[in-house]
Image (cartoon, rainbow, N blue to C red):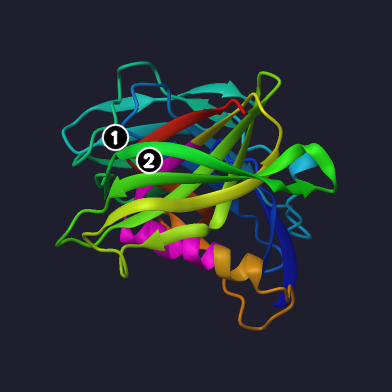
Amino acid sequence: MRKLIILVLILMQYACKKVINLDLPERDTRIVVSGLITNENTFYYVKLTKTSKYNFIYDVKKENYEQNALVIINDNVGNTDTLDEFSFGTYRTHKNKIMGAVGSSYKVDIFTSEGKHLASAMEEMPDVPKIDSIYFERDPTKTYQGNRNSYLCDIYIDWQEPANETNYYLRSYSYNWSNQWHDNIGWNWVFSDKYINGNYLKKENITESYGGKNWKFKLSQYSLTKKAYDFWNLVHEQTQSGDNYSNSSVPLIGNVYNVDNPDDYALGYFQVSALATKEIYIDR
């Protein structure tokens, strides 16, 4: 085996590119799974791509889609939905056939056009605390590159972290400039409640940004299972290591495997998360 660099785009709508080292057999191809079920009453998506058969380069500009697959989502009470291929390699649920709910469990089965059966285990959706409030403060003495109309803006939230239980979280955020949303994920925002268990987080500074007025900011806070938390931590560690050829790099094994051959795992993750959001308009 030799170290190979793969550019993996993971997790549904998140527009992030990270370079990941994977130690894989040179002639293998891996399916890349990006899926998410939340407690929102909406469509859910599963995106399937695959690495190059020969060099494992995963280029988001030249994605190798896994088309014509059969993708099925099941819950723990017998509901099932066979997804439609909404666009190249992206499969979508039908409205109201599968409903994400806290405390319910979900799994995905994927039958590829080559005859492979990939599946995840049932994963229960943990609860997520609501965000009580979101607000901002601006410092007009700190400008971006001397631009008088671009001041430093600190954004804060207030929320109650539940006591007497272990919780895991992932945060993402979006900006709206000129009526267009731009999504991002804070890789250092994958965290547990180890040091905040049961605390009321008053005026937690979640980010700072330079900008003018009249724009929107939206925070999304997802609950994570322990396994999903471990996966995202591994993604964070490998993308922040700064050494793409480190021998310490390990494969980003998610929760989707070949039913007939567990060694034939997929990359990425089929995630089950409750979601809390809060939005603010920056008007000055």
To which residue does mark 1 refer?
74
The quarter of the picture where residue 199 lies is bottom left
The secondary structure type at the circle numbered 1 is strand
Could you tell me residue 127's position as x and y percent? 24, 44
Circle 1: residue type: Asn
The verdict on residue 212 being magenta is no
Bounds of the magenta segment:
219-235
Label 1, label 2: how many angstroms apart (C-alpha)? 6 Å
Q: Nearer the viewer, residue 176 or 144?
A: 144
Q: In the rendered view of the protein, which quadrant contains the N terminus?
A: bottom right
Determine whether 261 is above or below 224 in the image. Answer: below
The secondary structure type at the circle numbered 2 is strand
**Residue at the right extreme?**
146
Left or right? Give the position of 66 relative to 143: left
**Residue at the front extreme?**
141
User: Quick check: marks 1 and 2 in contact, CB under 8 Å?
Assistant: yes
Left or right? Give the position of 113 relative to 196: right
Q: Residues within 10 Å of mark 1 (few under 14, many from 20)?
A: some
Determine whether 26 is above or below 116 in the image. Answer: below
Q: In the rendered view of the protein, which quadrant contains the C terminus?
A: top right
Query: Mark 2 or mark 1, which is nearer the start of the sequence?
Result: 1
Could you tell me residue 203's position as x and y percent? 40, 50
Circle 2: residue type: Val
Determine whether 166 is above or below 114 in the image. Answer: below
To which residue does mark 2 refer?
108
The verdict on residue 233 being magenta is yes
The quarter of the picture where residue 237 lies is bottom right
Q: Nearer the viewer, residue 144 or 114?
A: 144
Looking at the image, can residue 262 be seen? no
Could you tell me residue 268's position as x and y percent? 53, 52
Q: Residues within 10 Å of mark 2 (few under 14, many from 20)?
A: many
